[in-house]
Image: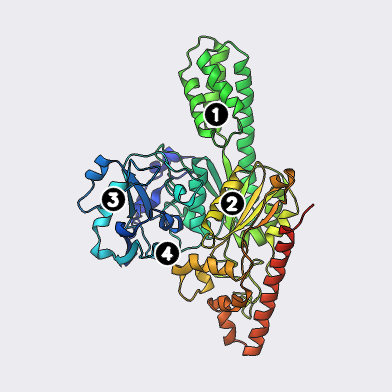
Amino acid sequence: ERMEGNQLPVSAFLDRADGTFPQGTTQYEKREIAVQIPIWNPEECIQCNQCSFVCPHAAIRPFLATEDEAANAPEGVEFLDGMRPYKDYKYRIQVSAADCTGCGICVLTCPSRKKAIEMKNREDHLEENNNWDYMIRLPHKENPVGINTVKGSQFEKPLFEFSGACAGCGETPYIKLVTQVVGDRMQIANATGCSSIYGGSAPSTPYTTNEAGCGPSWANSLLEDNAEFGLGMHHATKQLRQRTLELTGELLNLQIDNSLRMAATAWTEGFNDKNSARKLAEAYIKALETADTKDQKIQQLINDLVGYKDYLMKRSTWMIGGDGWAYDIGFGGIDHVLASGEDVNILVLDTEVYSNTGGQVSKSSNLGAIAEFASGGKPVRKKDLGMMMMNYGYVYVAQIAMGANPRHTLKVISEAEAYDGPSIVIAYSPCISHGIKCGLTVSQEHEKDAVDVGYWHLYRFHPENKLKGKNPFKLDSKEPQFERFQDFLMEEVRYSSLYNQYDAEHVQAIFDESLLAAKDRYQSYARLDSYTD
């Protein structure tokens, strides 16, 4: 971080000869780039946790404290009495002033009639640094609400924090939420792009660990083969886990002590149980490491299993990347991976443009949008990746937009993770390349507008519903207000700048064609939604 890397000898890295980096190093950067930061007003707070939910950098969070912890807090730190079911705790929203980027999304998102958060000069609130240091070091509390609600999800520590993404980034809130829902079982294959730059630019790594020291494993692959790379990770883990299952079967056929037998049996029965994966694995590991036997065959099996202990827990494989990867260069790999039927998950951060390399047009770019290599506006319609993947029938497919419907976003991520099969989640992600007139401060509101006017649609295709005799497709967004469609386009420079190149009549023709494409797409979804067998 001090730009003194060339002075480090090779010997300094010998303890990490496998090429790994420690997790959570972004917490040491403390860039202090925000001029203004959000300051909490407890008198107006309704404890909804929405400010934390939308924060792109995990820099503002809810905290729970006991009476003693609240009493020992730095002078001036205020708390609220906790609501049910955490009424035995004190509640506080705390910002990390040194990590906040000052985007202000939390303030705009706050639903209180009089905002419970207000942007104020950071230099006037330097005490927030000490307040954060105190709150972040409080002992861990079990989530009193659970992760199935927007509010409850934010009591889970985000295992993706303080990334170097643009202030107000539309991509990072999705990644952060996935780490809160799935937790430390994740193994991530990340395509090259924005998500790999802010996700792992050595030595700064935003993927971090929880109170137990466990967190997602992450590796970056090339733009063109990330899906195959992730499938390789998945198969490698799957094969090693199968080996542990075979060894456990051999162990259970021998005369082992009762405590080890109970742990081994419970682990075997819950081999594919995602919810209890870590609990079962930890209990089994403990039983293996404390087992006392003089039988050499039993001891050898125990030694082999302890050697494989990192694979006793069922992992969750996620492949993450942008639309340039998913729609274009890596599409063949994604198609292959989803067609495999394997239990893997794909998260597409759809900015509709090659964001990281300067804003080149992609197959996800919308009709009429200006980008490099489409300086006069893209002449053809956006590729419908989700519709293509639905044709398999056994792939979970969904489109989300956090700002339009936070509960829907959370539900989709939870369903994709729970589904025992391949899933792909396509997330609408406002980007600095869009040239949104009010900037990324309004990225969440802009996502809502995109859905309201029919520019983007929310849906879920869940294969399990077909097995239940239900329509597997559910259109979750309301009928669009297409009369506002052109007004939405004019909020972005990538569309409004068409007037700099063409006369008004020609631009209007482009906008009309873009609206027609949006209507056609909506009608195709509406027909699927109304289908009955």
Give whichever of discs 2 and 4 has the lower sequence position: 4
Residue 353 on image: x %, y %: 59, 68
Identify residue for label 3.
79
Is residue 496 at least partly visible in the picture?
Answer: yes
Task: Indicate the secondary structure of the residue bearing disc 1.
Answer: loop
Is residue 154 rendered to the left or right of residue 339?
Answer: left
Q: Amino acid at mark 4?
A: Ile
Give whichever of discs 3 and 1 has the lower sequence position: 3
Identify residue for label 4.
105
Query: In the figure, residue 191 lies in which quadrant?
Result: bottom right
Q: Which mark is residue 406?
A: none
How far apart are the alpha carbons under marks 2 and 3? 33 Å
**Badge nearest the viewer, 3 or 1:** 3
How far apart are the alpha carbons under marks 3 and 4? 23 Å
How many neighbours does mark 3 have within 10 angstroms: few (below 14), some (14-19), or many (20 or more)?
Answer: many
Name the residue nearer the viewer: 397 or 311.
397
Q: Amino acid at mark 3?
A: Phe
Identify residue for label 1.
308
Task: Indicate the secondary structure of the residue bearing disc 4.
Answer: helix
Residue 126 on image: x %, y %: 24, 59
Identify residue for label 2.
412
Name the residue nearer the viewer: 237 or 425.
425
How far apart are the alpha carbons under marks 2 and 4? 22 Å
How many neighbours does mark 2 have within 10 angstroms: few (below 14), some (14-19), or many (20 or more)?
Answer: many
